[in-house]
Image (cartoon, helix red, strand yellow):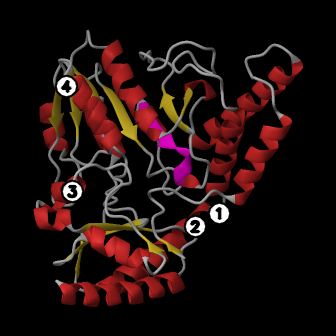
Amino acid sequence: MIYLDYSATTPVNSEVIDTYSRVCKEFIGNPNSLHRLGVEAKKLIDASSEQIANILGVKSSEIIYTSGASEANNTAIKGICLKYSNRGKHIITTELEHSSVIAPLNYLQNNGFEVDFVKLDENGLVDLDDLRRLLRDDTVLVSIASVNSEVGVKQDLKKISEVVRENPKTFFHSDVTQSIGKDKVDLSLVDLASMSCQKFYGMKGIGALIKRDKLIIEPLIHGGKSTTIFRSGTPATPLIASFAKALRLVYEDFDSKCLKVREVHDYLVDKLKDLDVYINSNEYCLPNMVNISLKNIKSEVMLHALEEKDIFVSTQTACSTGNYSKAVYAITHDKEKASSSMRISLSYLTTKEEIDEFIKAFSECIDKLSFRS
């Protein structure tokens, strides 16, 4: 099997599974309970939170555990906008956002909020002058992902933050799901940040929203004691402990891992140039993703053709809806490219030998499917 869909989800690190299993067996108490078993579970959660906070450069009190990035995005966007609607009902975002950002924005739009999409340049980067133009006295939120999940465009959060800070009434949220474990991101630049453990070799079902202490948000889930008043529910001790383990492991030998990804990325791109495809990703994209568009072949047909050869890629993000990539269209302005796009996502685990096998199979599929077409 050749797995090239790491941006959708990653295989769980065996050490993370060991931690999860051990905690399930040894820390059985409800961390809200007052007896010894509950106290031990709470101590483990507190220690895990401190470790996560130290790695991310935040306070442990700023961590809200969620079921994943989708819940974190919904909590951030709805939570801020509903709580501070007295400041204004204007929101700014981009055409590159994940569906779990766009959907809550649509919900708010249907409930009296106004949403503007900032312009992007030819590389998919936020037009800072247009962002400044769109900012208004009643702009309550700017939500811009650090890295797009389909093409891999990496935004300059520092410059964006500087523009947003020109309006002290506006909060800045970033979905950093595709950055954590792949890039170094400065979370001091934002007020809220969403992430998911499954993107950095951790368990599914656990994510986090980083929320500055000074901010008050309206919770999505009410009732039941937890690690925070902003998200109710019994804390998932095994998942939280495994979150800390996965985060620590992914940042070990981090520079070496990044170098491996860059080498494999460059090797892949060089091979793709010999094939009849468009390469949509550019120099401003993280090397973990290479987005391409096929010529006269439907991307879904290619996906299943590769699947028959035990090779796994994706067409859009796993959570996307619709029959074309809105992110690719936002950058290329080409409906045909957006309708035939594929995402090849890499890891430090990916080898050049795997890339060779992929290119061979991919080339064979192109010849076969083009002939059918």
Q: Position of residue 308 (x, y in %)?
A: 43, 78
Q: Nearer the viewer, mark 3 or mark 4?
A: 3
Judging by the rendered image, the residue that carries numbered circle 4 is 109
Q: Quadrant of the C terminus?
A: bottom left
Disc 4 marks which amino acid? Gln
Q: How many marks?
A: 4
The residue shown at (53%, 86%) is: 353
Mark 4, secondary structure of its residue: helix
Q: Which residues are magenta?
A: 192-199
Tag 3 near tag 2, CB within 8 Å: no
Among the two numbered marks 1 and 3 on one chain, the one whose residue lies closer to the N terminus = 1
Q: Secondary structure at mark 1?
A: loop
Which residue is identified by label 2?
Answer: 257
Q: Residues within 10 Å of mark 2 (few under 14, many from 20)?
A: some
Which quadrant of the rendered structure holds the N terminus?
bottom right
N-terminal-most mark, 3 or 4: 4
- Measured in 3D between alpha carbons, the distance from the residue under mark 3 to the one under mark 2, in whole angstroms, is 34 Å
Q: Is residue 196 above or below residue 2?
A: above
Rendered location of residue 322, percent (x, y): 22, 51
Residue 335 figure quarter:
bottom left
**Looking at the image, is mark 1 or mark 3 nearer the viewer?**
3
Alpha carbon separation for disc pair 1 and 3:
39 Å
User: Label 3 belongs to which residue?
Assistant: 323
**Extreme residue toward the top, this view:** 86
